[in-house]
Amino acid sequence: MMTDEKKKVNLTIDGIQVEAYEGDMVLDAARRAGIDIPTLCYHPAIGPIGSCRVCVVEIENGRGLPASCVTPVREGMVVRTNTEAVREARRTVVELILASHPQDCLQCERNGRCELQALAMRLGIRETRFHREKEHKECDTSSPALVRDADKCILCGRCVNMCADVQNVAALGFAYRGTDALVTPMFERGLAESKCVSCGQCAKICPVGAIHEKEEWQKVADLISDPNLHVVVQVAPAVRAAIGEEFGIPAGTPVTGKLATALKMLGFDAVFDTQFTADLTIMEEGTELIERLKTKGPLPLITSCSPGWIKYAETFHPEFIPNLSSCKSPQQMMGAIIKTYYAKKAGIDPDKIVSVSVMPCTAKKSECARPEMNASGRRDVDIVLTTRELACMIRQAGIRFQDLSDGEFDAPLGISTGAGTIFGTTGGVMEAALRTVYEIVTKKPLG
Ligand code: FES
């Protein structure tokens, strides 16, 4: 962001006079001037890496073709972003990446959302002049949450930076050099044996299909078709504000009613709302906080709703484990209730119930697989789908989500208060718990 304290720098990009600030990169200055230099390894969430060289430009009186994402602006600099040499260099870089890529786009999980695919299209690449035999690596499917396909990795380094610098986990790193280079957990182990906390940020930032969530939506569709099974679904608070975006509805628009309708159309036998157990969590965590305040600790109380954070604390900061709330997350509370209370009320053998949840986070897939998550005597939540997976299921079924009328979740596990709703926003869990604490302690409703 430009600030007044920084020194102004004047440069020319493609004949346009551009004003930038000391410390800006040529890429930033060009984009602000309306010139969209193509990039691949660059991502604003992690800053420049400078590894792919797709963003090269020509600089008058400069040497070679520098990468604009890591080249600072200079007073009087003259930059050209679309010369023949630049175009040829970019094409060559992308063709070389494609030469060691499986190019199985039609079967790829990222088909249609792949940045490499989009870049090849933008650069008009119709054939590749190069071919390279690359040693095949088996997909790493060891994690309950994520799949790593090293064959598709383009070594951009985004996941490595995200994991180490943003998430502070460093489960992934580079191994070997040159054509043998590889992004992998330590000693080429599977993700399940690494420090990975299943947060899924690597999958979110991967430009291709080299890391993605473990897809299970087709399995869910098949289970729904089995008449001997009773397939129940619960949906997290955040999903109703996110899924509309997949169907062209502005991001953040609540589509709760359409979501309930879609889930019923998909054939789930019961459609419940995780907000019901978010309310239970608030009561439990609120009461636990009051108890800890009375007995002086351990404080501060940290909510245990995020399985990624729990794994992070277990792995890197076990000294904080006593601070974690002893409550289960709303997903796991609902899973236990479905296979005990609901099974009994509905007269259904809990072993015939398939408990599915739709969550905004890949770490929920790991949470439900934890061995202690079996309060019902069996696994409480069988399958977790991400918001994106549910969108795939809805599209595959031919449901025009954006045109649906509003339906409702099933009672009683679909009823909730507004406190459960704010679980979907950052800090919402503790805000809701503290509101409850206020009401319990003061015996007055919060205005
Ligand atoms: Fe600049 Fe990759 S985008 S080097």
Image (spheres, rainbow, N blue to C red):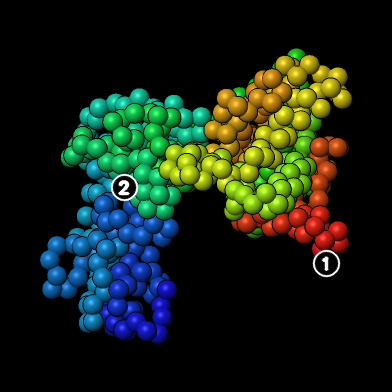
**In front here: 33 or 280?**
280
**Which residue is denoted by mark 2 in the rendering?**
156
Residue 415 x %, y %: 83, 43
Q: Is mark 2 within 8 Å of ligand 1?
A: yes
**In front here: 120 or 199?**
199
**With 284 as the anchor, is 346 left or right in this view?**
right
Could you classify mark 2 by the number of other residues whose Cα lies within 10 Å: few (under 14), some (14-19), or many (20 or more)?
many
Residue 134 x %, y %: 24, 30
Tag in front: 1 or 2: 1
Up-down relation of residue 244 to residue 78 (above or below): above
Up-down relation of residue 95 to residue 33 (above or below): above
**In front here: 181 or 76?**
181
Q: Is residue 182 visible?
A: yes
Q: Residue at x 64, y 39 (%)?
A: 326
Could you classify mark 1 by the number of other residues whose Cα lies within 10 Å: few (under 14), some (14-19), or many (20 or more)?
few
**With 340 as the anchor, is 307 left or right in this view?**
left
Q: Label 1 is placed on what type of residue?
A: Gly
Q: Is residue 18 visible?
A: no
Q: Residue at x 29, y 59 (%)?
A: 55
Up-down relation of residue 140 to residue 362 (above or below): above
Residue 229 x %, y %: 74, 18
Up-down relation of residue 139 to residue 276 (above or below): above
The quarter of the rendered structure image containing the N terminus is bottom left
The residue tagged with tag 1: helix, strand or loop? loop
Q: Label 2 is placed on what type of residue?
A: Cys
